[in-house]
Amino acid sequence: MRPETTLETGPAHLASGGGFILHHMRVWRWHFAGLFALVVASAACGVGQQVGLKFLVDAMAGPPGFQGAALSALALFLVLIAAEAFLARLTGWLACRATVGVGVDLRTELFDFLSAQSMRYFAENLAGSLGQRVTATAGNFGALVNTFVWRIIPPVVDVVGAVIIFASLDRGLTAALVALILVVTAGLIRFGARGRPIHRAYSGEAASIAGDLVDTIANMWTVKAFSARARERTRLEAGFRREAASQARSWLYLEKARLIHDVALWLLAAGILTWTLHLWSRGDVSAGSVVVVASLTLRIVHSSKDMALSLVDVAQYFGFIEETLAVIAKPVTVCDAPGAPALVPRGGAVALDRVTFSYGVGRSVLDGVTLTIPAGQKVGIVGPSGAGKSTLVHLLQRLYDVESGEIRIDGQPIAGVRQDSLRDALAVVPQEIGLLHRSVMDNIRFARPEASDEEVFAAARAASCDGFVRALPDGYATVVGERGTRLSGGQRQRIGIARALLKAAPILLLDEATSALDTETEMAIQAAIVRLMRDHTVIAVAHRLSTLTAFDRILVVSEGQVVEDGTVRDLREAGGLFAQMWELQAEGLSADVVVDVA
Ligand SMILES: Nc1ncnc2c1ncn2[C@@H]1O[C@H](COP(=O)(O)OP(=O)(O)OP(=O)(O)O)[C@@H](O)[C@H]1O
C-alpha cells in the first residue's frame, strides 16, 4: 500500500512567488532583457532632454541669434523627445508580447499542478475560487510587469541621471540627493514588505467570496426552489463587506505610503532648488544649470509620484501570487511513486485485500474489506444509502488512497502503477455525470478522441441515446449546456454510458449509472452492457435490484463491510439483507427503508 503521507511537493520554483515568476521569466529571458534595455534607453532620453534644455538656456544667455549653439541645443532637444516616444512604443510592443506569453505559461503550469490534486482536494476547495485564482495570477503578473516598466524603472533612471548631472555641478548637492533617496527607498521597501500580510489577506478574502458567488450561481435552482434568494443575498452581502473591509485595509495602507513619499519629495524639491539658487546667486552655476536642476527635480517628483504606490503595489501583486501558490501548489496527496510502471491490463481482475478507508477523522467508511472479482465477471453492488458503495468505486479509480490494505488490478497494486495507466484500464459512469459544455459528439468522443463517427454512433445506440440525440435541434452537434443542463437527467446518464462504452476499457464501473431511467430502458441498457462487455469486468452499483438479474454475482455492502456475496438467486434464498431489500422493492418500497427495518 502507498501511504497518503507520501507527498509530491512539486517543482522547487513553486515554493515562492518570486521563484515562480523568475522561473517563467527565464523562459522569455531575451524578451525581458530587451524590454529592460528599451525602458532604460527611453527614460535616459527623457533625462537627456533636460540637458538639451540646459544647453538651450545657456545659449540664450549669450548673444541673440538663431544659429550655432542654440540651433544644436534645439535639435538635440527635439531628437531626444522623438527618440523617447519611439522607444516607449517599442517597449509597449515588447511588454505586450512577453506578458501575454508568460500569462499562458503560468496558467498552464498552475492547471497542470491543480489537475494532479486528489479528489479530496477538490471536495475541500471551491472550483470557482480555484479558477479565479488561476486567471488572476496571469493578470497579476501582467500588472507586475507594467508596474516595473512604466512606474518603477523610469524614475530610477531619472534619479541615476540626476545624480550624474548634479555631480557635474556640485558635490554637496549630489551627496544630499543620494542620501535622501536611499533613506526614502529603504523606508518604502520596508513599508511595502510590512504590508504584505495585509494584501495577502485581501487576496484570500477576494478569492473565497468569488468562489462562493460562483457556487451560489451554479446552484441557483436550489436557491430558488427553497425561496432562499433574500437569505443568500444577505449572506453574500456579508461576504462582500468582509472583502471590502480587507480591501480598504490594503488600499489605505497604500495611501499611507503615498503620504510618506509626498512629504519626502517635497523636502527633496525644496532643498535642491533652494541650494541651486544659492549656488547661482554666488555665481557658481549658470542659469541653464538652475533650469536643468529644476526640471530634473520636477521630473523626479512627477515620475516617482506613484513610485511608493508602485512598490507597495508590487508587494500586493506578489501577495496575490503567493496566496495562489499556497492554495494550488499544496503537496499532492495522491501521486505516482517515482518511476512507477504503467499498469498492464490482463483481463480486468480486481482484488481488495483488507482495505480500510475513511474520508478524514471519524469512523471508517470501508473497514477491512477483502474480495476477489475474477476477470470478466459482472458484479452488482447493493446496500443501504451511505454504506460505502460509491467509496468503493472511488477507491478502485484511486481518487483517494486507502488507509490500510491494498487494491490490485490484474495482480498489480494500483498504488504502485501510474495513475493515468490505471484510469486507462477503467471506464466509469459516475452518479453525477459530468458533461462538458461542448457538443454531444465531443462529449461521447471524450473517452477516445480518435474514435470514428461510426464508433460514436454505435456506442450511442448501445446506450439507447442515438434516438433522442438525433431528435435534438442540431443532432450530435448540439451543445449540451454547462454540465449538461440542456438535457434531462436520464439523457445525461445515457450519454455518460455511451462515453464509457466507447472507451471499451477492461473494467467498467457503473455507480447508479441508470438510476434516472425508467425500468424498461434501464433493463435494456443493463442487458446491452452485459452483452457488449462480454469479455470485460463490470462492477455496477445499483439501487433497483431487479436490473441486476443478468449479473453473475451480487455483493451486499452495509456499514463498510461486504455482508453478503452470491448470485441473485442464492441471496434471495439466503433470507438476509438482500432478500429483505428484494421483497421491499417488490412491494414498491425503497431499499433505504430496509436500513431502518434491519
Ligand atoms: N467526499 C467525502 N467527504 C467526506 N465524507 C464522505 C465523502 N463522500 C462520502 N462520504 C461519506 O462516506 C460514507 C459512504 O458514502 P458513499 O457515497 O460511499 O455511500 P453509498 O453507499 O454510495 O451511498 P448512496 O447509495 O447513497 O450513494 C457516507 O457516510 C458519506 O457521508
Image (cartoon, rainbow, N blue to C red):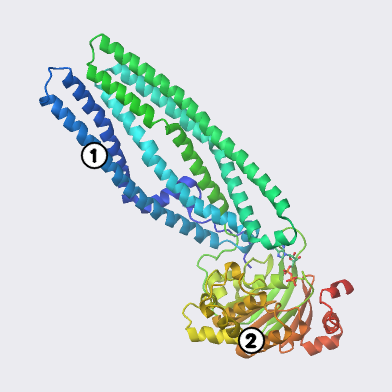
Q: Quadrant of residue 349?
A: bottom right
Which mark is first along the chain, 2 or 1? 1
The location of residue 251, given as percent across then percent down, is 54, 36
Pick out the residue farthest to the right. 597
Mark 1: amino acid: Ala
Q: From the image, which quarter does the C terminus lie in?
A: bottom right
Q: For the residue carrying disc 2, how many other residues have a C-alpha within 10 Å: few (<14), some (14-19), or many (20+)? A: many
* Residue type at numbered disc 2: Ile
| Residue 151 at x, y percent in the picture | 39, 37
- The answer to whether residue 411 is seen in the rendering is no
Would you say 34 lies left or right of 385 here?
Answer: left
* Residue pictured at 48% horizontal, 29% vertical: 258
Q: Is residue 96 visible?
A: yes
Residue placed most toward the observer, 299 or 475: 475
Tag 1 near tag 2, CB within 8 Å: no
Pair 1/2: label in front: 1
Relative to 169, is 222 above or below? below
- Residue 189's place in the image compared with 563, above or below, is above
Quarter holding ligand 1? bottom right
How far across and how far down the image is residue 428, in percent?
61, 76
List the single residue furthest toward the front. Answer: 473
553 lies left or right of 306: right
Residue 83 numbered tag: 1
Q: Can you identify the residue that label 2 sits on?
A: 529
Q: Residues within 10 Å of mark 1 (few under 14, many from 20)?
A: some
